[in-house]
Amino acid sequence: MADTSDIRNGLIMSQDGAYWTVVEFQHVKPGKGGAFVRTKLKNLLTGQVKDQTFRSGERIQEVRVVRQTYQYLYASGGTYHMMDKESYEQIELPEKMLDDVKLYLKENMDIDILMDGDKPLTIELPNFVEMEIRQSEPGVRGDTAQGASKPATLESGLVVQVPLFVNEGDVIRIDTRTGKYVTRV
């Protein structure tokens, strides 16, 4: 058991039978009354976000997680198949667990899965991924005064804004935290 002084971004806790991670928090000490911690929590399984306030010193149930490296193999019928890099054991993850990151996945990509025992809680992608542009309109030079951009569809179906000089077939680096173009590879 932990208390409110242990709350930090990324902390995973168990509450009401669900796993929640702290997205942001703020310690508040009003002039009158007791201190409290205002938090924004995200459900790891459903993605639901809620605001919750904890009184200072209140106990919370922290979940100790293990980070394991898996290799993404393939997706079929709403299920994503991963392989443990050490034991070669395969696990299946439901599509709803990967909703916000599935467009960044490429076959044979290494990802980290946070596990509570044998139960996968969430996945963490590398900060940058490299993907090939499958479809993009040619850029027209001379119709902009500053750095213009155009939409490009990547091999996974993700659409990002890229500079005009980037063409179909180019490989680009994408920041998975922001979903933005970084550089041409």
Image: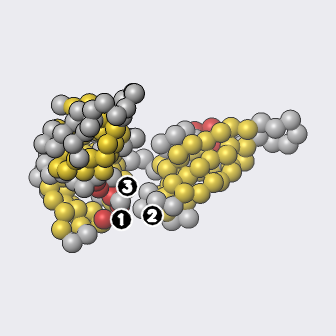
Q: Which quarter of the picture shows residue 164?
A: top left
Give the residue number, with chain letter if any, for mark 3: 100
| Closer-to-camera residue (124/183) | 183
Q: Answer yes or no: do the residues labelled 3 and 1 have beta carbons within 8 Å?
A: no
Where 141 sits versus 137, above or below?
A: above
Element on which disc 1 rests: helix
Q: Residue at x 21, y 42 (%)?
A: 138
Element marked by disc 2: loop
Residue 130 x, y percent position in the rendering: 21, 39
Q: Which mark is residue 142?
A: none
Tell me if label 2 and label 3 are in contact, CB under 8 Å: no
Q: What is the distance, in whole Å, between disc 2 and disc 3 at their CAs?
A: 11 Å
Q: Amino acid at mark 2?
A: Thr
Tell me the tag on residue 46.
2
Q: Amino acid at mark 3?
A: Asp
Type of amino acid under label 1: Lys
Tell me if label 1 and label 2 are in contact, CB under 8 Å.
yes
Q: Report whether residue 65 is seen.
A: yes
User: Circle 1 is placed at which residue position?
Assistant: 96
What residue is rendered at 25% in x and 69% in y?
78
